[in-house]
Image (spheres, grey):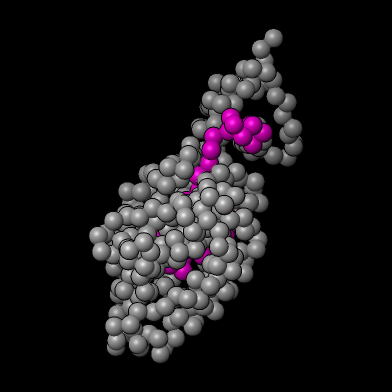
């Protein structure tokens, strides 16, 4: 596909010298050259890139691994959206926290999860009407992003929650950041809902598993998504909490089937045997995300190059004009 498109532009490509290495394949040389030309486009001419982080509980830690690979490759990201755990990763990234620094996030999440899901707390959840508080994660969010508001972020960001009373999808893209992120990852039936502006808000993954539409709303032309959908077909829940989580995952899977089409490219992360209590495997999830991103990186670059080719052609035509 990339070669076919490039052949149509061969006269214009001749105007741009290839800085090629003789040991690389022709496909790699062509991709490298067009990639460099795409990145060299002025910001006003380059298509705006949106990055979406799906829901997925602890599986969402894999988004950090995807980010590491994209940053190392110099892949441009202009706007960000996320839901549930994807909202946490997205908010940190939009706030300017580099993927390299996020390496500490999985470890801290594991520590907080051990406290949140202690046997006594889980017993209280099952035997009383008292839901689990996520104050530890809330503190983690505030420590990293402070009291920032959406309009203070280096990159535009949006996240989504659900109103527990009405079932409405609530989109956050203005106001204070921390309560919005906290609401987006509040698993219904497990964590206490976030009370915000007279609404009772819970996990956004129930209504919008892959919020690609939010990046379009923020101005993205081309959208890539990191998706950590559960393989629930192979999972047999062994207790009430895991059964509840599986119901949420099934709902997310139904949404994901339709929402994948809203993204131009999907990094499909496939964690194995991971449930929402597997926070001790957070670093493993980050590595799984990095592997998925490495496998899909060339295809993502090609997809973006093909989208940008009409703009490259205009620029090359202007250079070739006498």
Classify residue 182 as left or right of residue 248: right
Name which quarter of the figure residue 18 lies in: top right
Residue farthest top in this picture: 322
Total marks shown come to: 0
Report the residue at 65% width, 46% height from top: 74
Where does residue 151 sit, x and y in percent of width and height?
A: 53, 50
Q: Nearer the viewer, residue 316 or 189?
A: 189
Q: Nearer the viewer, residue 205 or 267?
A: 205
Please report the bounds of the magenta region as a residue range: 39-67
Where does residue 301 sit, x and y in percent of width and height?
A: 57, 41
Q: Is residue 62 magenta?
A: yes
Q: Is residue 16 visible?
A: yes
Q: Nearer the viewer, residue 197 or 38?
A: 197
Where does residue 65 sit, x and y in percent of width and height?
A: 57, 60
Report the residue at 35% width, 79% height from top: 131
- Figure check: 276 above or below 15: below
Name which quarter of the figure residue 14 lies in: top right
Report the residue at 66% width, 12% height from top: 321
């Amino acid at each position: 596909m990339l070669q076919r498109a490039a052949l149509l532009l061969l006269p214009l490509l001749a105007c741009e010298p290839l800085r090629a290495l003789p040991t690389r394949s022709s496909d790699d040389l062509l991709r490298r050259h067009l990639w460099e030309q795409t990145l060299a486009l002025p910001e006003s001419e380059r298509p705006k890139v949106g990055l979406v982080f799906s829901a997925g509980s602890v599986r969402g830690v894999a988004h950090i691994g995807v980010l590491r690979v994209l940053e190392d490759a110099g892949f441009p990201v202009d706007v960000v959206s996320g839901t549930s755990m994807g909202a946490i990763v997205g908010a940190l990234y939009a706030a300017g926290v580099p993927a390299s620094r996020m390496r500490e996030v999985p470890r801290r999440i594991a520590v907080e999860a051990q406290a949140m899901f202690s046997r006594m707390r889980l017993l209280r959840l099952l035997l009383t009407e008292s839901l689990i508080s996520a104050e530890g994660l809330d503190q983690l969010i505030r420590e990293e992003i402070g009291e920032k508001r959406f309009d203070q972020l280096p990159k535009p960001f949006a996240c989504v929650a659900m109103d527990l009373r009405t079932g409405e999808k609530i989109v956050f893209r203005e106001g204070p950041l921390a309560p919005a992120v906290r609401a987006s990852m509040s698993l219904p039936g497990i964590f206490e809902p976030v009370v915000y502006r007279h609404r009772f808000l819970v996990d956004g993954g129930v209504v919008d598993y892959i919020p690609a539409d939010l990046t379009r709303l923020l101005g993205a032309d081309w959208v890539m998504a990191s998706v950590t959908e559960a393989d629930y077909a192979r999972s047999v829940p062994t207790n009430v909490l895991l059964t509840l989580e599986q119901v949420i995952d099934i709902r997310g899977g139904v949404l994901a089937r339709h929402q994948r089409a809203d993204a131009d490219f999907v990094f499909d992360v496939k964690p194995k045997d991971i449930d929402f209590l597997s926070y001790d495997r957070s670093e493993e999830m980050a590595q799984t995300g990095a592997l998925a991103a490495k496998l899909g990186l060339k295809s993502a670059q090609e997809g973006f190059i093909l989208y940008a080719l009409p703009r490259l052609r205009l620029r090359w035509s202007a250079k070739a004009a006498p």
